[in-house]
Amino acid sequence: MNYRFSNKLANLAPSAIREILKATSDPSVISLAAGNPAPDAFPIEELRRHMADIMETEPITALQYGISEGYAPLRSAVADDLRERLHVGGEEDDVLIVSGATQGIALLTQALCNEGDVVLCEEPTFVGSLNAFRAFGAKPVGVPMEDDGISIEALRAACEAHPNAKILYLIPNFQNPTGITTSLEKRKAALALCREYGLVLLEDNPYGDLRFAGEDIPAIKTMDTDGTVLYCGSFSKVLAPGIRVGYLCGNRALLAKLTVGKQTQDVHTNGLAQMAAYRFLTGGNYHAHLKSLPEIYRRKYRVMRDAIEAYFPKAAKTTEPEGGLFVWCTLPDRVDSAAFCKEAAEHKVAVVPGAAFLSDPNGTSHAFRMNFSTPTDDAIREGCRILGALLHEKL
């Protein structure tokens, strides 16, 4: 049959990262391409205990249909944690549980954007968000990144150039893919521009609890007094990505419309996973678990940093993240990263070409992303050694 796909999906390409990960099923391939949490960060035994107890004591609640807004005890516990720990959430705000943070991003796009409306975002940015914007007919427009976050001058110019822009999408902490953290001054400036031009600021913070250096910077949502900011969080990086439990904190009127959209997608987030997340969040060990995470990622990053210093040529410039999962490597302009990443794959090392993270799907990049959280220490060292040798040949 000749399928006639919708305009929204006809030109939507598969995630470059997911396609790369298929190739890494070969056990001989060293994958520095993933975006997964460190395996030793998973609280496996505690989650197993909680889930077993739920199936023993509350099986019908876990297996029955739930309300679209989310499991009420979890919503309340998330709201309390955000307010007490991060000072996020005001009197006009509520919490909506979503099936992973990417669903929250998709729901906001669905609710606000008509065909052709613009979503402003950092350039480069998370490929999953780019595909979510495109899937609902929105046009992502990238705004250049600087060492301390999005260029405010370029952001103002983009707001002027795109009066149909509806959303500004930011990952202010340890950004995916660059690892950059947005300064407090730029957070304030971006919020002011959103208010001036009538944009909703979508603050995506999946990595905020993985800080291993530097000082915490207040969330943009802590400065929100008028419902401009929608805060997006997730349990993927602090519990387990497979449970697919995320959350949104924002103005009640906005979340009410997003809840209607959610009812067209999955009705509600997995009940058993929500209940397990609630028990973990309120069971007494959650904050101790959060405190244990930075050391895991600090050590893993140091392994990659030391390997980069040992093997990479000076002309390959890498970011120095203060948390998160990623290092971004920028090559001289004469080197196309797509060709380099293909050559690296032929040498059994997988990294993600920078073009995958661009708002223009036909754009070119001179950078690539490396992940230090998932591989073993030996794999990080050997992968960087191979990449370094190839880079020395190129440069």
Image: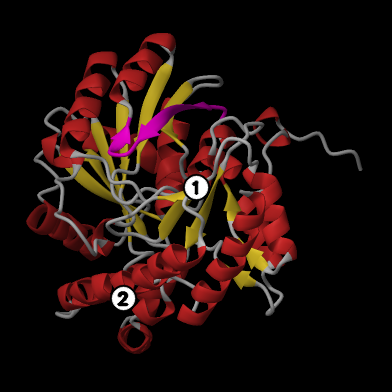
Q: Which residue does the numbered mark 2 point to in the structure image?
A: 296
Relative vertical location of residue 128 with respect to residue 145 in this rendering, above or below? below
Residue 380 in the image: x percent, y percent? 50, 73
Q: Which residues are magenta?
A: 137-150
Residue type at mark 1 is Ala
Residue 371 in the image: x percent, y percent? 47, 62
> Where on the picture, by quarter, is residue 262?
top left
Relative vertical location of residue 152 with respect to residue 292 in this rendering, above or below? above
Residue 116 visible here: yes
Relative vertical location of residue 276 with respect to residue 7 in this rendering, above or below? below
Residue type at mark 2 is Ile
Residue 101 in the image: x percent, y percent? 40, 52
Most foreground residue, 145 or 104? 145
Left or right of 215, for residue 114:
right
Magenta highlight on residue 195: no
The CA distance from mark 2 to mark 1 is 29 Å
Residue at x-position 56% and y-position 70%: 385
Q: Secondary structure at mark 1?
A: loop
Question: Earlier along the polypeptide chain: callout 2 or callout 1?
Answer: 2
Q: Secondary structure at mark 2?
A: helix
Q: Which residue does the numbered mark 1 point to in the structure image?
A: 315
